[in-house]
Image: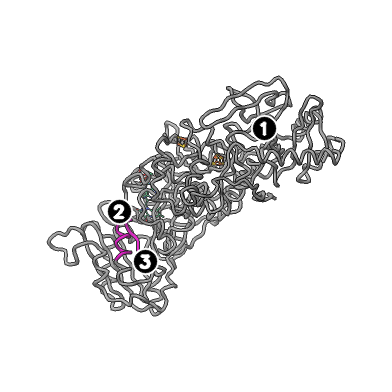
Amino acid sequence: MIAYSNPMMPHLCRINSRKKETHDTFTITLDVNDEEMSPVFRPGQFNMLYLYGVGEVPISISGHPQKTGKMVHTIRSCGTVTRGLARLKSGMPVGVRGPFGSSWPVTHAYGRDLLIVAGGIGLAPLRPAIYQALAHRKHFGKLILLYGARSPEDVLFYKELQTWQKRSDMTVYLTVDHAISDWDHHVGVVTNLIPRVNFDADDTVAMVCGPEIMMRYAIMALRNQEVPENHIYLSMERNMKCAIGLCGHCQLGPKFVCKDGPVFPYHRIAPYFNKREI
Amino acid sequence: MVLLDRNTLNQMFEALAESGFTVIGPTVRDNAIVLDRVNSINDLPVGWTDDQERGAYRLKQETAGAFFNFTNGPHSWKRFLYPPQLTLFNARRRNGDIELIPEKPTDEKFALIGVRPCDLAAIGIHDRIFLKDHHVDTDYRERRKNLFIVAVNCLNPGNTCFCTSMGTGPTAGTGYDLVLTELFDEDQHHFLAGTGSVAGTKMLEKLSAPPASPALLHHCDEMLKEAATKMGRNIRTDELADMLRESFDDPYWQEASAACLSCGNCTMVCPTCFCATVEDVTDLTGETATRVRRWDSCFNGEFSYIHGGILRQSTLSRYRQWVTHKLSSWEEQFGSSGCVGCGRCITWCPVGIDITEVAGKFWEKKYPSRKKAATKRQQPREVLIPVN
Ligand SMILES: Cc1cc2nc3c(=O)[nH]c(=O)nc-3n(C[C@H](O)[C@H](O)[C@H](O)COP(=O)(O)OP(=O)(O)OC[C@H]3O[C@@H](n4cnc5c(N)ncnc54)[C@H](O)[C@@H]3O)c2cc1C
Ligand code: SF4
Ligand code: SF4
């Protein structure tokens, strides 16, 4: 079997179901039947999704890590490949390589407060970590999710957020940059919420994912609260053509985002983070 | 160590071809010494030599007929081990269903004749990247597995060479099957040949050449030692990686990259640069699709594109990325410098930007009173990882 020992060779997975999330975002669930492909993943990992004849893009896995044999992907349709993926129907095949990359160290937060800060589509890669934390809820102190979107219609997984919000063992704050009249959550950037929630700063693990600018302000806010640098984790985004550290595109200083990341403890990438044109 | 003459060397070409090797070596084409198929010693650049300077390359015909009296041309061996274009797979669509058809790896066996010590080190660096990392490049593995390497030591380093500084030459370290040193003067034309592998030893047995005298070996050693002092360029590498790691905001990058055209020539000629992109091509009906890997360059805009824009907009940022990757971050990534001192990027830069000058500037700035270039020869680096 030369084919599948080759990490550049996709596996075919059929779309089991698809769901519209927001005006520009959708979720597809893929069946993993190929024996050569891992049916499991760790929260924060991603797959390369190949759209026949068009291209291949890195997309995080957004499903439950304990449900094996399925790969769930939540995708914002914004360009050539993602718009094409948006048009695929149930039953159609997608090429998949993966799972790749590092993961959210959920167990690092055992015995501590877990603070999750997400912006926009950044909630998708964090959802498996939330599922995992909820499945082992008793191991954590506080469990807090701060989520920000541009507008109410951009809020991802709204129903699920509402269910989480109702739980007594989880704190969820939602915010949008621009609100309409019947929005009864916060307004303003998500990072403004950080000083307003109650957590044990020096015994907290923070997981942050969103646009780079948002992550930058999140880190500033977390550092202001004195969350230690090595307790802050973020997921980075760079152009990727191979996902196995051989195409060179995703370099961030000496780091390869695909194989050393995408999830990094902040102190490991601090010298390269927030540097223009690095 | 044995002594080959022209005829025995020619027999080696025949023996390699008989064993099924595609024999690749230096040959003259389009006013340059390139790497391509060679059938016999007559295809080598017999009597040719080259003049190299920043942004300049010229071939010269000498009356005498040495085979290897030149240094590296624009090609490097990576084009055979890591081809500029490679089909990754084909795909077929029928009735909404897709079939993915893996591309069979090449079964071509290459014999590389005339691999210079710096380029041998470059192959070792690619071995580290493509065979010893988290994932293996399966196409590289197949090509590498069957390789026969004939290295050639350098007695006349070129004007843009600095392998001594990088610890890669001018004497080949390890990783070859055979190593030659060309002995050429009025009285003789011979090749001192040593073996570095079982395959190399078998080849020498086949060629049945006489052993070289201890006096000749000594003479050869002396010449190679002298060659190490004749480098056209030198840099200091101690502390260089650290200096560059901290150089991000250094205003000197402005000056260093001012002339850069962002053409990417340096990355194409560099024997260690390995960045690649992929392209998807379909036929007109859309019934078949092909995914192709191509060499890419960090000097291209799309290289750093993510939705919303190109991350490295300025030429400065691309030049800085290239130099800091080669001379600094490579060490953290793969345990060695990404530069072997072959000098190609200096010669083939259309505006003559010189990586040794740029590296030297960082040194000068930090230690204005110290010597910019090492005069002491560095210990040869053992980077080559034997395959199999
Ligand atoms: C580790 C990782 C995880 C990701 N997870 C998700 C996710 O869960 N959901 C989601 O919607 N998006 C995710 N993205 C972003 C997603 O990969 C891009 O939106 C997508 O590549 C855009 O491709 P396109 O062809 O539609 O866009 P175009 O703008 O047409 O882009 C052209 C090409 O540029 C490259 N490219 C463009 N934007 C990006 C980008 N942001 N990151 C990497 N390469 C890019 C791709 O090769 C793409 O095909 C992730 C990116 C990374 C690196
Ligand atoms: S950086 Fe320049 S001198 Fe160094 S190996 Fe590459 S081409 Fe040769
Ligand atoms: S350094 Fe020279 S060869 Fe490299 S991109 Fe700039 S102009 Fe081109």
Choose between B141 and A4: the one closer to the eye: B141
Q: State how far apart marks 1 and 2 are (Cα).
A: 52 Å
Q: Chain of mark 1?
A: B
Q: State how far apart marks 3 and 2 are (Cα).
A: 22 Å
- Can you tell me which quadrant of the image ligand 2 is in? top right
Q: Position of residue B53 (x, y in %)?
A: 55, 31
Choose between A94 and A169: the one closer to the eye: A169
User: Which portion, as a residue range, is magenta?
Assistant: A208-220
Residue type at numbered disc 1? Ile
Q: Position of residue B303 (x, y in %)?
A: 42, 43
Choose between B334 and B70: the one closer to the eye: B70
Q: Chain of mark 2?
A: A
Instruction: Identify the residue under disc 3.
Output: A207
Marking on residue A25: 2
Q: Quadrant of residue B223?
A: top right
Q: Is mark 3 within 8 Å of ligand 1?
A: no
- Residue at 49% over, 42% down: B276
Indicate yes or no whether the magenta region holds residue A218. yes
Choose between B18 and A84: the one closer to the eye: B18
Q: Position of residue B383 (x, y in %)?
A: 64, 50
Left or right of B199 in this view: B80:
left
Instruction: Identify the residue under disc 1.
Output: B24
- Residue at 27% over, 69% down: A194
Q: Chain of mark 3?
A: A
